Image (cartoon, rainbow, N blue to C red):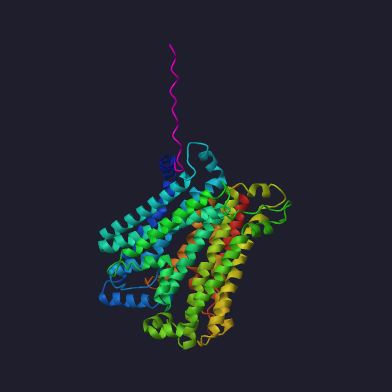
Amino acid sequence: MTASAPATHRARPASSVTGTGSLLRVSLRAEIRSLAPWMVVPTILTLTSVLGFELLGRTEQERQALNQTIAGNPALGLIFGPAGDVSTLDGFNAWRGMAIGGFVVALGAILVVVKATRAQEDSGQAEFLAAGVMGRNARLLTALAMCGIMSLVAGVLSGVITAFCGVGWESSLLLGAGFTATGWLFGALAGVTAQLAGDARAASSAAIGALGVFFILRGFFYAVDVPGWLVWINPLCWVQETHPAEGGRWWPLALVVVLAVVLAGAAFAAQSARDFGQGIFATPPGPDRGRVHTPLGLMVRLNRSPLVYWALAFAGLGVVFGYFIRSMREILEGNPFMAQLFAHGASSPEALSATFVATIASLVGIIVSIPGVQTVNRIRTEELEDHAEPVLAGAVTRSRYFGAGMLVALGAPVLYVLIAGSVMGLFGMSAGIGLSFADVLLQTLAVLPAVWAVIGVAAFIVGVVPVARVASWLGVVGSLALTLLGPSLKLPNWLLGFSPFYHVPPVALADPDLWGLLWVGVIAVGLVVGGFAGFRRRDIP
């Protein structure tokens, strides 16, 4: 009798997405706390719109005044987009929530995708995952799925809760769908940059930079008289064209979804073409011997790329804001209510021009404070990545180390303000509004104490209570909210005064009041000194 050969079982070939389901479940459980804010903030934004409208528009006359004030403010239009009929609850909610809510969801989507892809490769976590039964595309698919779920929950939660609060169902759901589509789009874009860039920081910077450019161009296109076809080259304008409070159009969101699918496909194709741990555009190797010999040189080297990117960005912002300055006469003449808004306390056309430019300069200052806060947070990031401890173990003192980071954080905004102010000054001197190049440049430089105060808040948080690092952005968020929304929401002056930019006077006036700005500078110095003291005494990291 012959023995039969043992049966052999051929293993099924593993798919490139094998293990995605298990990884997705584990990732959602691990990251639920970091995902929650991006899902909740858009809902909070829309809910505050409902509450704010009830406070501002108790009578028909108040609602019409609010409508005319918002419609004629170019600074508000640049950030929040074109104002339709904001005298209704649906219109006010759509205007106040669409652009900012979409921006928040898109920003969260970018960070989620980069963290689950390139950041895992940079930290070594991806190697442990790849050692198991997992396909090559599983991590990218998991990242995009997490982004998709987060964006969907954010849109549904915002739409349903807002509708229960009195906003029309179709308007609320369309607005929420816009949040979701925006998150999907920029999550897919982050998937592409994660394959192209050399590391996670470069990937997130590229995606966030693209989001910022599209966001500013969206406001610019709607604020100026551009050809209608030009609006359709910006995907954020596609979301804006849904007009949730004006009948509503769902089909522009289909364009956003199609583009998101195309970008996701490009991300998978690019991942197949690159080496693990390297981007399509790989970071070149460094020199054989180090060339950085001082803490200041180290901080400049760590922030070299952001310094270049932000300098180029502020040159572009100077053009955008410079156009507003040059168009000031037409803007004010076309809307007398806006003239009343900016002419509060102004007694002459020159004073009106100075007040207008001061408002634009304050908006520039708020944006300038963002890279400053990023640089301060970079100090903390170096600690958490165990890069700071070897440096401090040598002859470098804590004061020199922290001081070098603060010198870059406080000095770079001077460069950015000079760039933006110079470009704006060129537009202003040719606008015929009674202001010279020096007047506009001096007004932009006047925001620096306020910028340093915002950066000082971040320095104090990172130096004293680094575990609350997220609070380092309170200065930026608070200043933006109080400066842009405070006047239109009729907030009291004592509350508006919490924004350091509230104290920036129109310096082109004959006798500007500089005392408030002086006190802001004193507070900035105190915050930075407090950050120094805390950093010298606390543990590292």
In the depicted structure, whether residue 102 falls above or below residue 232 = above
Residue 244 placed where, x, y %?
31, 66
Residue 502 in view in this figure = yes
Of residue 243 and residue 9, the one placed in the foreground of this image is 9
> Which residue is the extreme one toward the front?
1
Of residue 240 and residue 56, the one placed in the foreground of this image is 240
Q: Please give left or right for residue 344 compared with residue 59 in the image.
A: right
Which quarter of the figure has residue 463? bottom right
Residue 143 placed where, x, y %?
45, 49
Q: How many numbered marks appear?
A: 0
Q: Residue at x 56, y 72 (%)?
A: 315
Residue 493 placed where, x, y %?
42, 72
Q: Residue at x 60, y 64 (%)?
A: 307
Of residue 11 and residue 304, the one placed in the foreground of this image is 11
Residue 105 in view in this figure = no
Q: Which residues are magenta?
A: 1-17
Residue 55 placed where, x, y %?
31, 68
Q: Please give left or right for residue 301 compared with residue 215 in the image.
A: right
Q: Is residue 11 magenta?
A: yes
Q: Residue at x 46, y 43 (%)?
A: 16
In the depicted structure, whether residue 50 falls above or below residue 269 = below
Query: Principal SS element in the magenta part?
Result: loop
Q: Is residue 88 magenta?
A: no
Which quarter of the figure has residue 28? top left
> Which residue is the extreme one toward the top?
1
Q: Residue at x 58, y 70 (%)?
A: 416
In the depicted structure, whether residue 372 falls above or below residue 15 = below
Which quarter of the figure has residue 90? bottom left
